[in-house]
Amino acid sequence: MPNIQELKDLTTQVRRDILRMVHKVNSGHPGGSLGCAEFFVALYQDIMERNDGFDMDGKGEDLFFLSNGHISPVYYSVLARSGYFPVDELNTFRLIDSRLQGHPTTHEGLPGVRIASGSLGQGMSVAIGAAEAKKLNNDHHVVYSLHGDGELQEGQNWEAIMYAAARKVDNLIATVDLNGQQIDGSTDDVLPLGSVKGKFEAFGWTVIEIENGNDIASILDGMEKAKSLLGQGKPICVLLKTVMGNGVDFMMHTHAWHGKAPNDEQLEIGLSQNAETLGDY
Amino acid sequence: MKTYENTGNKDTRSGFGAGLTELGKTNENVVALCADLTGSLKMDEFKNNHPERFFQVGIAEANMIGIAAGMTIGGKVPFTGTFANFSTGRVYDQIRQSVAYSDKNVKICASHAGITLGEDGATHQILEDIGLMKMLPGMTVINTCDFNQTKAATLAIAEHHGPVYLRFGRPKVPNFTPENQNFEIGKAVKLTDGNDVTIVATGHLVWEALEAAKALDSEGISAEVINIHTIKPLDSEAIIQSVSKTKCIVTAEEHNHLGGLGESVARVLSQHQPTPQEYVATNDTFGESGTPAQLMDKYGLNSKAIIEASKKVIKRK
């Protein structure tokens, strides 16, 4: 298991990957990707129990589903750096004939991805299905999922949230990236979410809050606590408070970089704030 | 002319229920999900036999499709059950992304398709579902004609890897295809040999086509009736072969002429063998309340309409 410093170094490298990927094709979603870099690194390098290699059914291992598929850059970077496919393939992000589509898909056979996502609000239902299948298979591993906060405006989430509590899907840890931003502005401006914690609790979930979702140690602590509450008849929601664009100063605390790539100069600034650690792809 | 015996009217949805019950016993990976229509979909027996493999999701079809997609990860073969309207239009994007694009082995089983669900009216009478489903890459689209065939199709799709849309209905209709038949996905079934006109029909219109062929026969017109239970992939070869002989074709379906079987047939023929074609289908309209027989008559979806279309298309040769 990597130590905290190693996880931090990997996170820095992932941030470089994200910036370079979206810069190259002048498209993609750096803001949310940067905000979740620590979470993905912690999840894949420490929190999840994963088998070697990749098989779609994922029996005997923990599973992860990304519902807010637009943060594919961080997903791809961490999958590659966790051994699912060659790191060099990050060079093909969003290019023609690539397995690294703009939004994640199983269609091109990219190892590590088990469902397409991009059209928002569908991932929690899928994660619940996978969790139900694990129960049927007597497989005691955990299903993790990640959702945007703005994404909770999609109604299907609430169908899923109601179902998971009613059916005691207690092998599921659904994390919501609470960065308070969406395309058109802050979530408070676009459509206030109210108390996300209160809503999940009212639906019958156990809620864990991670106040600093950009701090590896806090993420590890919070997720460990979440895991300890599995199997008690309730699904677990983790509210991960992050800063969109984290680690690149001019991208932080704004929705402006939700779906916009840096230009050459901005890339250089961003990279200078995140010195190479494990080697660029 | 070969004739077929109605062994007794039965609803196609009960054929689905019977098939699902059998699958419950023979395939432990089969799971069933329902959005508050267990009785209507005839899923009760499966539910009672295998409560641990039956998932009542409530009135939440989008969630049902997503859960079904997720259950395939781990090797389950999910069968979702609700009305055709709520199986397709309501959840198109969920099917598109989480099932079709993700190539998930989900069987979307849809009852009360078309206009013959009757008195509930247009909100529940979807006449666009074949079009919606056939446009999805990788989706298999099946519309069965009677109880026995629906049961056989239900068994067959469990063995087929990939997303399937299985369409059936509510009314009791003649049951005339063989019991325990071998259902071959994508393979048309020629029911009668004929030389003057080809009638390709799907779903409830297959029996109507046979009735039409009988009446035409008595007037000296020989009709070749083909049961197209699989609209996608379409058995192009069987259609081309038949029209090579008859030189004209009638397509018959309980669906809008836009997007249905007729358009699939027209595409094949325009590419390979341009042939005069008449459509027995609804004419870009919503349905309304009424008995199934009244609606079939008013919207031109019965043997009478097939006879008229056949005579018309023969004149166009």
Image (cartoon, rainbow, N blue to C red):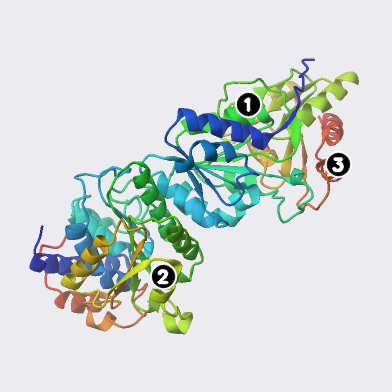
Residue that lies at the very extreme toward the right in this rendered image:
B219
Is residue B251 visible from the viewing direction of this image? no
CA gap between label 3 and label 1 equals 26 Å
Q: Is residue A80 above or below residue A266?
A: above
Label 1 element class:
loop
Residue at 83% from the left image edge and 35% from the top image edge: B309
Residue B192: image quadrant is: top right
Residue ID for mark 1: B188
Residue A71 rendering spot, x and y as whole percentages:
33, 65
Disc on res. A24: none
- Nearer to the camera, B273 or B52: B52
Q: Residue at x 53, y 40 (%)?
A: B47
Relative vertical location of residue A164 with respect to residue A60 in this rendering, above or below: below
**Residue at mark 1 to residue at mark 2: CA–CA distance:** 51 Å
Q: Given the image, on which type of amino acid does mark 1 rest?
A: Ala
> Which residue is more in the foreground, A52 or A198?
A198
Q: Position of residue A252 (x, y in %)?
A: 28, 81
Judged from this view, the residue extending furthest toward the top is B1
Pointer 3 indicates a residue of which chain?
B
SS type, badge 3: helix
- Crowd tier of the residue under label 2, counting other residues whose Cα lies within 10 Å: few below 14, some 14–19, many 20 or above: many
Q: Please tell me how crowded label 1 is: few (under 14), some (14-19), or many (20+) other residues with Cα within 10 Å.
A: many
Q: Are marks 1 and 2 in contact (CB under 8 Å)?
A: no
User: Is B244 in front, or is A190?
Assistant: A190
Is residue B258 shown left or right of residue A213? right
Q: From this viewpoint, is residue A223 visible?
A: yes
Q: Which residue is mark 3?
A: B297
Pointer 3 with pointer 2, Cβ within 8 A: no
* Residue in front for this viewpoint, A215 or B31: B31
**Label 2, on which residue?**
A200
